[in-house]
Image (cartoon, helix red, strand yellow):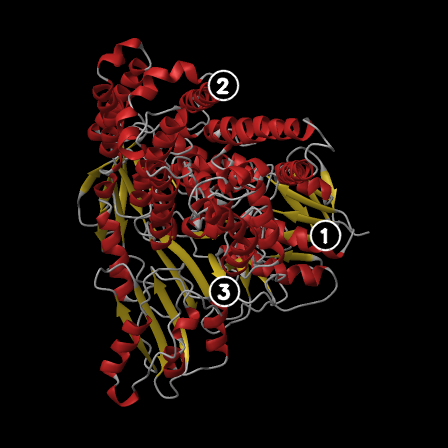
Amino acid sequence: MDSLVIIGNGITGMTTARLVRKQSDRPIIVISDETDFFYSRPALMYIFMGHMKFEHTKPYEDWFWEKNKIQLLRATVTSIDTNAKSIALNNGQTLPYGQLVIATGSRTNKFGWPGQDLTGVQGLYGMRDLELMEKNTSNVSRAVIVGGGLIGIEMAEMLHSRNIPVTFLVRETNYWDNILPQEEAKLVGRHIREYGIDLRLGTQLKEILPGNDGRVRAVLTDKGEEIACQFVGLTAGVTPNTDVAKSSAIEINRGILVNEFLETNVPGVYAAGDCAEFRMNRPRHPKIEQLWYTGRMQAETLAKTLCGIRTPYDRGVWFNSAKFFDIEYQTYGFVSNLPMPDEESLYWEHPEGKHCVRIVYDKTNRTVIGFNLFGIRYRQAICERWIRDRRTVEYVLENLAEANFDPEFFREFEHEVIALFNSTNPARKVLLKRRRGLFQMA
Amino acid sequence: MQPISIELPHRDFSAIKKAGLALCAVGFLFMIMALMEVSRSNPVLFFMLSAGSMVTGALVFILPQLKESPAGIKHNRLFFLSATSRGFWGWAAAVFFTGFYVILYWFPQYLENLIRTTDWLSWIMRGKPADQWFLYGFYYTLAVVVMGIRMIVKNRHNRYQIIRTCSVMFFQLGFAFLIPGLLQLFNQPEFYFTYFWPLKYSYLFPNDIQWLMSQPGGLGVFMIYWGAMMSFVATPALTYFFGKRWYCSWVCGCGGLAETLGDPYRHLSDKSLWSWKIERYLIYSVLVFVVMTTLLLWINSATQGAMFGTWSQNFSSVYGFYIGALFSGVIGVGFYPLMGSRVWCRFGCPMAAILGLLQKYWSRFRITTNGGQCISCGNCSTYCEMGIDVRAYAMKGQNIIRASCVGCGICSAVCPRGVLNLENGPMEGRYNLGR
């Protein structure tokens, strides 16, 4: 039968392989030049921090792949010949394919900063970066991180765990406020500073300065300040890794262009995950999705198509989550960083400043559009249902306890959220239907 | 696969924490001295110098963590430190714990002088001099309380963990130490209300029943009644409502030690499918063993020895030696620093076996997963002391219902995406297939 060749053994590649195997016996080959086995990329930070070893980050034991006849190949793909339906590997081998999936992920953004290739300057995306970071951070008295996104704050936490002082350059007025509304962005900013991280908001990197040894000596900011450091983390986002497709007939823009079925312009060749770029416009959805979750969900869709049930990708109700040092973040639906003209939002923050809830709703029909949660866990299924069923903010508030997913005995904040709503909407007062309590669940 | 050479972090411990560790070491040395003749002249002084210094030192080490950094999951460097990653100090601790149990069970005469340092307390509590079991009970309880404080400090952001830890400290201190002692002070039988058959197997053996029956006053009879009720009524009922955790991680003394003294080692449990297989063979074999022993003893007792003679008693001695002492004590605690904190609870405890079967087939308890938010990072599996591959379920969005789960709640605490939650709910639909 037609062999399925997958380039990339990240969440997208491996999920595709696993799910195709569930439905068919065809040969499946997964090629990676990064690691022998699939590991969880978001867990890289925990290896560096000593929470886990590499082996703990592997979601499946090593025997799993052989048992399921998924062949793992450690090699670099040098070119794709779409006419001959084959790929060439760096070990000289040529591999024919029936269907080809490109799931090569991302690479670190570098914006042409002077000195960006000096020793001690790096991003954090894969295992190689982690090994490099291990080397680059020994005997470092200060590190500078450039770019206030999710990888930036992870890197700050990693370095902090090794007692390395960190200066964190963030271009935005508040941390990640191109995504988060101001209140949430400030909440995270305070927490970053609580950890002694030197957070520099509204500050950009201008230049990375070399020492005599060819290693980074300092960075120069756009405010003219020189900060001495021996390590620079570049965390201003990632960009699709499309190298493998570059000299082939496969169409590329920023990412490998795909339609809603994750098909490229070449029949039998697919792309999914970080490296793929959708051709079509989807309101409020990015064309390139660079999340773990989207990588997995695209793979789930793609596996169906590969097994003969051509299925369009549907992201469903948007969700994402992260953790900023100790503060967990969950978001469901759409919460935009700047208030939208037809939307209103209820924002409640605990006086201690480490828990908050934002519920965004439509001004006119009052249906709920999105949730932001910091330091509080809500049930994804319930929030999704409310959004999909177009429930009103009043309905959601009355039933808010249903969504609570915090562990037993945790403080419940629902009544405080409702009290805030009632004080600002005296004409629409709502009453919490029931507390979550100890023995209730959805 | 990935040879990552990780260097030791620049600074290990702050000066004050080092001072605390040093004080612990000094206390430990005095404990060694207390084993010798020299302590006989002033046992109370040696008690203070050994136990006193160790407790003070431990607190000096633990309490500064309150100020060290904001509350949250702090497992930094756990896999770099030799004590918590099967390095030199881990092995040293394992040899020490194992050796201590061997001496305690089979060579208590060498502990004589150390036992005398706890005499004063034994007199106050029990109105009689200390023996090896009093010494053991005292240090066991001390470990649960001091390391319980550590657990609370470490998890001060997590109310489930705080309350649960207080619970194991309370039951150990009150029901497994003070009450059995005070009972003796008032000439009542030494009885542990928080241990039941089959963990405390002898409580349903003919010998113990006869011994309790023969006690003056009604208390002995009440104790028999209590033990039987707990084994046969309370155990299924409470497990139905709350899962196995009501006992294993809230009440039990073995669990109490594992959740406190054992916490720094919880991540060392083996998560492989292979170890799960071994676990099932072993734990149910022990259960069969103890049930058979109990039956044989009763048949023998009913037939007044006509059927088995001394044979059933031998059977019981073998159980006592291999399971009661060697497995639950020497290996169960001794191997903490090598195989994680729940070696006995996972591979041996017959009580856990029964609770586990109930939890699997007749309970409202489950760990739920929050939609599709798992990032497969592996923190939940790594920190599961029972060696459950929690992630395998979480990434499929399945509920986790495993016989071995003691409901400690650490998987939910360490999950960086808020995916896991311990819940009680209707049995219907408890097993879901996930995404």
Of discs 2 and 3, which sits in the foreground?
2
Point out the residue furthest to the bottom here: A427
Whether pointer 3 and pointer 1 mark residues with C-beta atoms closer than 8 Å, the reply is no
Q: Nearer the viewer, residue A204 or A355?
A: A355
Q: CA distance from mark 3 to mark 1?
A: 29 Å
Amino acid type at circle 3 is Lys
Chain name for mark 1: A
Badge 2: chain ID: B
Q: Is residue A295 above or below residue B129?
A: below
- Residue A412's place in the image compared with A12, above or below, is below
Spot occupied by residue A293 in the image (x, y as percentages of width and height): 51, 58
**Quarter where residue A315 is shown:** bottom right
As rendered, which of B360 and B397 lies closer to the eye?
A: B360
> Horizontally, is B51 left or right of B140 in the view?
left
Give the labeled residue for mark 1.
A21
Q: Amino acid at mark 2?
A: Trp
What is the chain letter for disc 3? A
Q: Position of residue A53 (x, y in %)?
A: 48, 35
Determine the residue located farthest toward the right in the rendered image.
A1
**Residue A350 in view of the camera:** yes
Describe the element under mark 3 as helix, strand or loop.
Answer: loop
Residue at image mark 3: A287
Q: Earlier in the sequence, mark 3 or mark 1?
A: 1
Residue A277, how many percent across, how many down?
53, 61
The residue at the point 43 percent across, 18 percent down is B108
The disc labelled 1 sits on which kind of residue? Arg
**What secondary structure is found at the residue carrying circle 2?**
helix
